[in-house]
Amino acid sequence: MKLKLIKFLDLSIEYSIYGFILCIPASIALVGTFACIAVVLFLIKQALSPDFSSVRSNKTLFLILLIFFIFMALSLFNSGPLIGKSLKALFIKWGRFFFVLWMILDTFRDIKRIVKAASVIVFSSTLVGLSVFSQKFLGFEFLCHKPLNGDIVTGPYPNQNGLAAYLTGVIPIVLCFSLWQWKRIWVKIGFLLITTMLMLSSLWTLCRGGWIGLTAGLILVIFLINYSRLPKKIFWTLFSASYIFCVPLIAIGLFFLKKDEQRVILYRGAWKMITEHPFLGKGLGTFMDYCAQYTGHPWACYVHNCFLQIWAESGIFSLLSFLLFNGYVFYKSIKVIMRAPASLNSFLLIGFNAGLLGFLVHSFFDTQLYSFQAVFLYLVVLGLTVALSSKLGTPEKTRLVNDRRLI
């Protein structure tokens, strides 16, 4: 009876995760509902049958995450009268990182489940692309009934930046599906058409940060897929040159040739806050409260640079540990990609990495890590990246034994 209940809970958690993946572009309420159901069921399952193997197998990653939380918690010493808001940000906004990541790693130990999750992402993104086209050419958006705002499309999102963030994260995943050598040509053509539709949707957002993030992700896709075809010295030379020169030049061209005065003011305000409290920050979740004080304008805005905001609110050590956390994921997964033979699974892992990179690059110019919908996309892609790289990096014999344990 207990075993049947655990299997039922496991299946319910899996489909609850599919539920919030599907709803990420369309409904904050449904994302929150499905995520809460999944987390509650996961905690019940852990109470009935404690299993920390997914944490132990990724202990370095969770250790870095713990360090990140410790430094964020230390920033509360500077929160002053806003301590209540800082505690809420620590345990609710950032606290979900641990539980959602643990839940995804525990649930998606099977490659078939990971591929199903990626398929849900593709299906959801296809609906978003179709809604953008209907908004662009018919004047209405059928998912959330958003009207067309001039020439700028928003899809089911309140603004074009939210849509661009979503597309930046999912386009590389769909692209890698389309680049695989499918036996049936109509499957490949279908994925290519979806990719083209999403690329045009990203173009129509007119979101410069999204374009830069997407460019960074697409460069990663091109190089990792062609890694085995190039001599290593040439590969690393071209790869380094692309990120050292190309992406910064694009950023300069898009942002400094077309000056965005409000963002510059916000960046300067964040820097003033950083210079006052460089090590522990001004207090987690407090930037909007101090925004007017440091910018000299009556705004209550995010910095529009997630990394500057992390530094301003919780200090340099929080920022460094967050960068180390993401860097470790890239290091481990790209290492697996370079050793694994070409397969649909390795292509999918490339897509996850590129989507994650694009999302983080876009976060340098916007507020993705502080957006409820966008941060769940980040956590899903991050969790699936770690889960798939762990699976592909496991020797075949060990993998078969672990798969039998799940049956």
Image (cartoon, grey):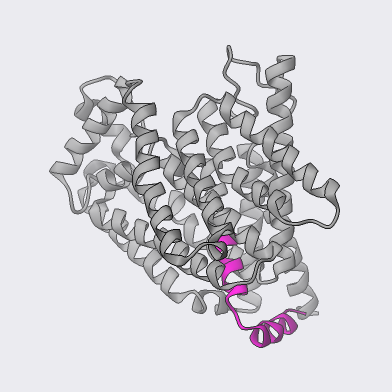
Residue lying farthest to the left in this orientation: 276
Q: Residue at x 68, y 19 (%)?
A: 136
x, y percent for residue 138: 75, 15
Q: Quadrant of the C terminus?
A: bottom right
Image quarter for residue 235? bottom left
x, y percent for residue 73: 30, 57
Q: Quadrant of the N terminus?
A: bottom right
Q: Which residues are magenta?
A: 384-407
Q: Please, is residue 398 above or below residue 229 in the view? A: below
Image quarter for residue 166? top right
Q: Residue at x 70, y 71 (%)?
A: 110
Nearest the viewer among 372 and 182 is 182
In the picture, measured across the screen, residue 223 lies left or right of residue 236, that is right
Q: Residue at x 49, y 55 (%)?
A: 96
In the picture, measured across the screen, residue 232 lies left or right of residue 277, that is right
x, y percent for residue 384: 60, 61
